[in-house]
Image (cartoon, rainbow, N blue to C red):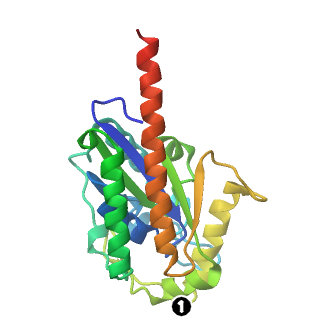
Amino acid sequence: MSKSSNKIVLIGMSGASCSGKTTLARLLTKVLPNSWILHQDDFFKSESKIPIDPTTNLPNWDCPDAIDFPKFIKTLRHIHQTGSLPDSFRSKERLNTRNDTKIEAQLESLIKQLSNRITSSINNLSDWKFILVDGFLLYWDMQVVKELDIKLFIQADYTTLKKRREERAGYVTVDGYWTDPPNYFDTMVWPNYIKCHRHLFQGRLVTIEKLVVLNSNCVRDIYTNLEMAAENVLEFVKSNKVCGMLEENKGK
């Protein structure tokens, strides 16, 4: 966590394409004050530098080499130190359309309830900044993992993910617009997801310390996931305060 005067918390929200991580991140900004989202998708390389899959001869947007990790890591470190984006940063992610979960009355009520709990539980709330880092490859590079104070991983099954991905229109890229060709999920998205996340699990054991695993197979899961995400933020803030008090006492 940052050593600056502001308490800057980076919250990793990762999972497969269409797992619901962006929807959860956007809802969490309604719960957490002083919060905003950093999208890993803003760090895709230009189309000319996206690796070509040797089997399908298609651009592979779902492998680690499609992301400019040095730039991504540098940006995360800058945010952790300053609580803001580099002046040169430009986002294209806001141009992408999303089929987000409609915020119905019950969900609005939960958001208000969690927001009130956060406000009443954290002293000097204005000192804190919460940055939600949304990306499909947050736990591939350990330098990225080290910058994340809270780590969430959102799962969904193959059938659910495929249906959601194939219902999506496409993506704004650095150079234009990308639409999945036929069978892209089966030939590229799903195999890369399995390959790049196999290291996270050994049997039922999670290999990254304090990685919180959530499920999003149905729309109703968003309620549980939002509550769990907010609870993890509260736990982190409380534990950080305890550590801070212990350090202060050591110095006396």
Quarter of the image with the C terminus in it = top left
The tally of labels here is: 1
- Tell me which residue sits at (25%, 45%) in the image: 86
Q: Is residue 242 left or right of residue 196?
A: left
Q: Residue furthest left?
A: 87
**Observer-nearest of 246 and 60:** 246
- Tell me which residue sits at (43%, 56%) in the image: 230
Can residue 58 be spotted in the picture? yes
Q: Residue furthest right?
A: 203
Rendered location of residue 190, percent (x, y): 62, 75
Rendered location of residue 79, percent (x, y): 32, 43
Which quadrant holds residue 170? bottom left
Q: Is residue 132 left or right of residue 146?
A: left
Residue 1 vertical placement versus 93 (above, below): above
Rendered location of residue 61, percent (x, y): 49, 70
Q: Is residue 187 left or right of residue 47?
A: right
Q: Residue furthest top?
A: 252
**Observer-nearest of 51 and 156:** 156
Rendered location of residue 159, percent (x, y): 62, 85
Residue 88 vertical placement versus 156 (above, below): above
Say what amino acid the circle numbered 1 marks. Pro
- Tell me which residue sits at (49%, 51%) in the image: 232
- Tell me which residue sits at (53%, 69%) in the image: 62
Which quadrant holds residue 133? bottom left
Dot 1 crowding, Cα within 10 Å, few <14, some 14–19, many 20+: few
> Badge 1 is on which residue?
182
Which quadrant holds residue 153? bottom right
Can residue 148 be spotted in the picture? no
Quarter of the image with the N terminus in it = top left
Query: Regarding mark 1 in the picture, which secondary structure is present there?
Result: loop
**Observer-nearest of 201 and 58:** 201
